[in-house]
Image (cartoon, rainbow, N blue to C red):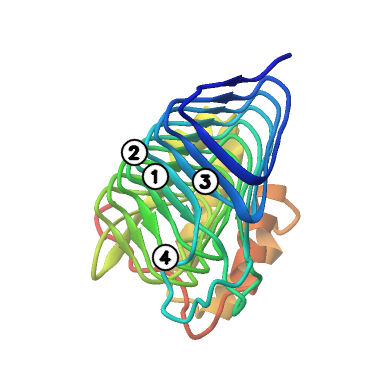
Amino acid sequence: MSNRIHPTASIKGNVELGDGVEIGPYTVIDGIKGKVIIGDGTVILGHSWIQGPAFFGKENKVFPFASIGGGPQDIGYKEEPTEIYIGERNIIREYTTINKGTVQDKGKTLIGNDDYFMAYSHIAHDCKIGNNVVFTNGASVAGHVEVQDYAILSAFVGVQQFCRIGAHSFIGGYSGVTQDVLPYAKVVGTRPLEVIGINTVGLTRRGFSREQIRKIDRAFRLLLRSSLLLKDAIQEIEKEMGNEQEIKVLLEFLKTLDSRRGFHRKFREGK
C-alpha cells in the first residue's frame, strides 16, 4: 500500500514510514535530532509537528496542531536524546502535547494502545499511559505520572508529578489530583479530592459482574469507611477475597504505594 504525503509536508532527517501512512499539509516530521518511525496505517493530519526520537505503532491518528516529541518542560533539560513511544490505534486530537522523557528518570514517555486524547490534552515528560485510557478536553498530567488501563480523566483534570492513577478509575471534571487514585475509584474535587464511590458504570460497561463489583465495593468500605488502620484493612481484604483477580489489582496498587505521597482516601459522606 502506497503512502500519501502532501507536497507541503516537511519530512527531514532520519524518518522511516510504514505502509499506508498519510501525512497531511504543512505537517513537520523532524528526524534530525533522532529517528522517527511512523507505523503502518498511521494518519497524521495537517499542521502537526513531530520530533524524534519518536516511535509510533500502527494505525494511530493524529489531528491538526498536535505537538509530539518536543523537549520536556523541565528547566534541567539539556537537549539530551530522550524518547517517546506511542503504541497502536491511538487517537490524538487537536493541540494535544506529548513531551519526551528526561535523563533524570527513565528517559522515555510511554503511551499504550487504544487511548483517546481529546483536544488540548497534555502528557508531560516520563509519563506512562496504559491502554484504553481517555483524556477528556484539557486534561493534563505532570511529569513522571502513571495512568493505568481504562482510566478516564474528565475535562481539565490536573495531576501532580509522580502520582499514579489506578486502572478503571474515573476522575471528575476540573479535579486536582495530588496523591494516588485507587483502581476502580470515582473521585471529584480539589483540595480535597474526594472519593464518591467506585466506578460502577465503567466497570459494568467493561463486563464486570455484579459479584465482582460487590467485592470491589466491599474492599472500598474496608479501606475508606471502617475504623481499621490501612495495614489492617489490607489484611482483612486479603483474608476475605484476596484470591479474586480484581481484588489482586487493588492490593498490588496498595502494596506499591509511596508512603510519602499516599492516596486520596477522603470519602464524601452520604454516598
Which residue position is annotated with label 4?
142
Q: Residue at x 59, y 34 (%)?
A: 114
Looking at the rendered image, the disc whose residue lies closer to the viewer, 1 or 4, is 1
- Are the residues at dot 4 and dot 3 in contact (C-beta closer than 8 Å)? no
Q: Say above or below: 10 vs 123.
A: above
At label 4, the amino acid type is: Ala
Rounded to the nearest angstrom, the CA distance separating label 3 from label 1 is 12 Å
> Which comes sooner in the sequence, label 3 or label 2?
3
At label 2, the amino acid type is: Ala
Along the viewing direction, whichever of 171 and 122 lies nearer the viewer: 122
Along the viewing direction, whichever of 33 and 7 lies nearer the viewer: 7
Residue 128 in which image quadrant: bottom right
Which residue position is annotated with label 1?
96
Q: Residue furthest top?
A: 1
Q: Say above or below: 151 vs 249.
A: above
User: Where does residue 47 sit, x and y in percent of width and height?
Assistant: 39, 34
Give the secondary structure at mark 4.
Answer: loop
* Residue 119's disc number: 2
Which residue position is annotated with label 3?
50
Q: Say above or below: 252 vs 50.
A: below
> Which comes sooner in the sequence, label 1 or label 2?
1
Rounded to the nearest angstrom, the CA distance separating label 2 from label 4 is 17 Å
Give the secondary structure at mark 1.
Answer: loop
- Are the residues at dot 1 and dot 2 in contact (C-beta closer than 8 Å)? yes
Rounded to the nearest angstrom, the CA distance separating label 3 from label 2 is 17 Å
> Which comes sooner in the sequence, label 3 or label 1?
3
Looking at the rendered image, the disc whose residue lies closer to the viewer, 3 or 2, is 3
Q: Residue at x 52, y 77 (%)?
A: 78
Along the viewing direction, whichever of 138 and 49 lies nearer the viewer: 49
User: Where does residue 156 sit, x and y in percent of width and height?
Assistant: 27, 50
Q: Residues within 10 Å of mark 1 (few under 14, many from 20)?
A: many
Rounded to the nearest angstrom, the CA distance separating label 1 from label 2 is 6 Å
